[in-house]
Amino acid sequence: MLGTMMDFPLTLQHVFDRGTRLFPDREIVTGGLGERHRYTYKDFARRVHRLASAFKALGLQPGERVGTFGWNHYRHLEMYFAVPMQGAVLHTLNIRLFHDQLVYIINHAADRFIVVDRSLLGIVQALQPMLETVEKIIVVDDGGDCEVGDALDYEQFLASGNEHFDFPRLDENTAAMMCYTSGTTGNPKGVAYSHRALTLHSFGACLSDSVGVSQRDTVLAVVPMFHANAWGLPYAATMVGAKQVFAGNSMAPDRVLQLMQDERVTLGAGVPTIWIGALPLLQAGKYDLSSVTRIACGGSAAPRGLIDAYDKLGLNIVHAWGMTELTPIGSVAVPLTELDSADPATQMDFKARQGTPVPGVEARALDSDGKEVPWDGQTMGELVVRGPWVAASYYNDDRSAGSFTSDGWFRTGDIVVMHPNGYIEIADRTKDVIKSGGEWISSVALENALMAHPKVQEAAVIGVPDEKWSERPLACVVPRPDFKGSVKAEELSEFLAQQFAKWWLPERYLFLDELPKTSVGKFDKKTMRVQYTDSTKAVTA
Ligand code: ADP
């Protein structure tokens, strides 16, 4: 073999060393109810060494799992590095899962220690009798008042460690993190991320044809650190030495916007519901977000109306698509040169799509025979992907088989059309797409159109059983406060009729005060199907 390059492992050590050595004075800020906590990368680095050494002294072995049960804050960031860099695996637990699901995933992952925020300690204590492998709880005092009992205090524990701890050299394929999908069906499935995947994903997040995280940024991930590694942003931001801002124990719009204003955030990131909630405050001119250069939005479809409304405020929403199984970034709606000369409406159409695959991710759409569908902007197919940060299997789970094609692509379960310029447009999830008379209706397209109506705040469209057509769409609509009780199904139907074929139009509308959301803020269509399918409150358009 020809001599080529060094065998340099792609591990979080590099991500950490680069950020902390080159940018020791950059800040990491955590918001909260009381005073904001701030320290530098230098302080952060010292504490990560101490924390790692304390875990070693506690007996943590390579490959063992340590759970975290917490909000977004600097101590969670310390855990993001201290555990994986010593060869163990950080398991971020979703604080909003049902209790039986939490018990399942903690036992399934066999977590040995759990680091938990004091404000959430009560939940973990209630589960403790059912936990089979957890030996010790370590409590982060975030001002919560739950009795700590015989748990260790995070600060004392960290202080017992050695600041000069040496991290071992790791194989890049070592597992670093793990995370479970929120489990819309059945028990959650685990995904274990290797150091290599997390490192390459950080490079991916820093490309300008992606989210473009840079040392010039101040990053606020409004996506929980317990969900898909906060989109990998804490790692990407650390690698380039960006200033990082965490929201602490709440993601309420006023807290988020206050932090963005005060800390001069340049890059915000979160699911659409966060930005939908923040919109009225921004429209009322309450905050100065002039520092913001872009807001990454994904996790579920960012409605065109939302992107448009932000655009009018001078705020650039960059739509991104991802999945827990993809570490999670898969595609980003970057402005292609070819679109520069397009009219504003066409440009907005593309901003509302899910974008081009990020370098590192290969994407195809397949028909039901497994053949690639044409890139014609019309033919629907299932999106399959592969790449160095795509999971090769679920962690210890025999449900893996159905999720991969025989030639090694991951089946996303998302139904898409591919546009001639390589843009992906998500039409639906396989389980949400409405099957009417042998054809497919995109629930996402309908709800996005509804959310562009001036009287509509939120909308979700679900398929309900129908004798003749097998399924028909039911529109669940939350009117804007001023139009509660006055918005009519007919006017919404007429509005949709301007954009869709007649057979796509929902016959029935259900007006609600709010829509059920999943643990990570997405419309919970599974619950909606159970609760609303037979609702007698639905009105006919
Ligand atoms: P969960 O199954 O718990 O929602 P994930 O957070 O991994 O788990 O969700 C991934 C799914 O979210 C994708 O398969 C896709 O259906 C949806 N999704 C993510 N980003 C977008 C987006 N920008 N537009 C539409 N759907 C999206």
Image (cartoon, rainbow, N blue to C red):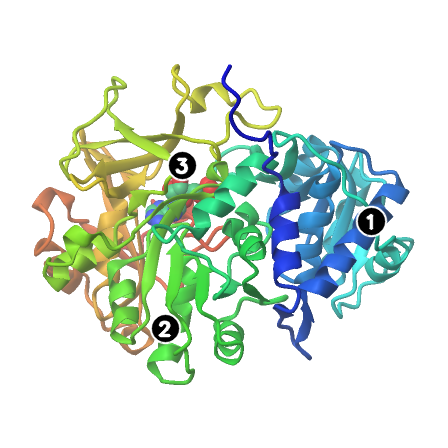
Find residue 306 and report its horizontal and vertical position in percent. Answer: 29, 64
Find residue 240 and report its horizontal and vertical position in percent. Answer: 54, 56
Of residues 369 and 377, which is closer to you in this image?
377
Between discs 2 and 1, the one toward the N terminus: 1
Mark identifier at residue 137: 1
Residue type at tag 2: Leu
On screen, residue 531 versus residue 454, left or right, reads: right
Residue type at tag 3: Gly
Between discs 3 and 1, the one toward the N terminus: 1
Mark identifier at residue 387: none
Q: Disc 3 and disc 1: Cα gap in Å?
A: 38 Å
On screen, residue 103 versus residue 281, left or right, reads: right
Which one is closest to the eye, mark 2 or mark 3? Answer: 3
Label 2 near ligand 1 (CB < 8 Å): no
Residue at the disc numbered 3: 360
Which one is closest to the eye, mark 3 or mark 1? Answer: 3
Q: Residue at x 68, y 31 (%)?
A: 108
Q: Residues within 10 Å of mark 1 (few under 14, many from 20)?
A: many
Q: Quadrant of ligand 1?
A: top left
On screen, residue 451 versus residue 110, left or right, reads: left
Element type at marker 2? Answer: helix
Residue at the disc numbered 2: 279
Find residue 471 and report its horizontal and vertical position in percent. Answer: 24, 36
Q: Disc 2 and disc 3: Cα gap in Å?
A: 33 Å
Q: Residue at x 33, y 58 (%)?
A: 318
Q: Residue at x 36, y 42 (%)?
A: 358
Find residue 141 and report its horizontal and vertical position in percent. Answer: 78, 65
Residue type at tag 1: Ile
**Relative to 486, residue 177 above or below:** above
